[in-house]
Amino acid sequence: MIALGGGAFIDPESRDLAQKTGLTVWLKASFANLVHRVKIDGTRPNFQDKAQAERLYQMREPLYALAKVHVVTDDGTPDSVVDEIIGEFRKL
C-alpha cells in the first residue's frame, strides 16, 4: 500500500500510474471536517487561510473522485474506515 499526498493524485501522470498499478482509494472528508482536523496556522502552504483552502478543496475534489473507491470518513472511526477499505480489496 502506498499513501499519496493530496497533490500527487492531481498530477495526470501520477494518477494514471496509480490507477494502472493499484486500487486507488479516496478517503473523502467534508471541507468542514478538514478544517476541524487541520490547523490553519501557516505551516501548510496550501492551507494558509480558510478561503484559500476551500478553493483548493473544490478544485481537487473532481480529480480525487476519479479514484476507484470512495470511503467517506466524516463519521467513521479509523477501524471502520480500514474495514471498508479491506472489504473493497476483498472484492477484487
Image (cartoon, rainbow, N blue to C red):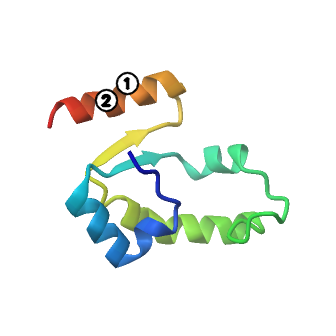
**Amino acid under disc 2:** Ile
18, 79: nearer the viewer: 18
Residue found at x 59% / y 71%: 55
Q: Position of residue 67 (x, y in %)?
A: 31, 56
Quarter of the image for residue 83 reads top left
Q: Considering the numbered disc 2 on the image, is that residue within a helix, a strand or a loop?
A: helix
Distance from disc 1 to disc 2, alpha carbons, whole Å, reads 5 Å
Report the residue marked by disc 1.
Answer: 83
Q: Position of residue 75 (x, y in %)?
A: 53, 29
Q: Residues within 10 Å of mark 1 (few under 14, many from 20)?
A: few
Residue found at x 34% / y 77%: 12
Quarter of the image with the N terminus in it: top left
> Is 65 displayed left or right of 7 in the figure?
left
Q: Position of residue 76 (x, y in %)?
A: 50, 28
**Amino acid under disc 1:** Asp
Report the residue marked by disc 2.
Answer: 86
**Which numbered disc covers residue 57?**
none
Q: Position of residue 59 (x, y in %)?
A: 49, 72
Image marks 1 and 2: residues in contact by CB distance under 8 Å = yes
> Is 10 displayed left or right of 52 in the figure?
left
Residue found at x 44% / y 62%: 61
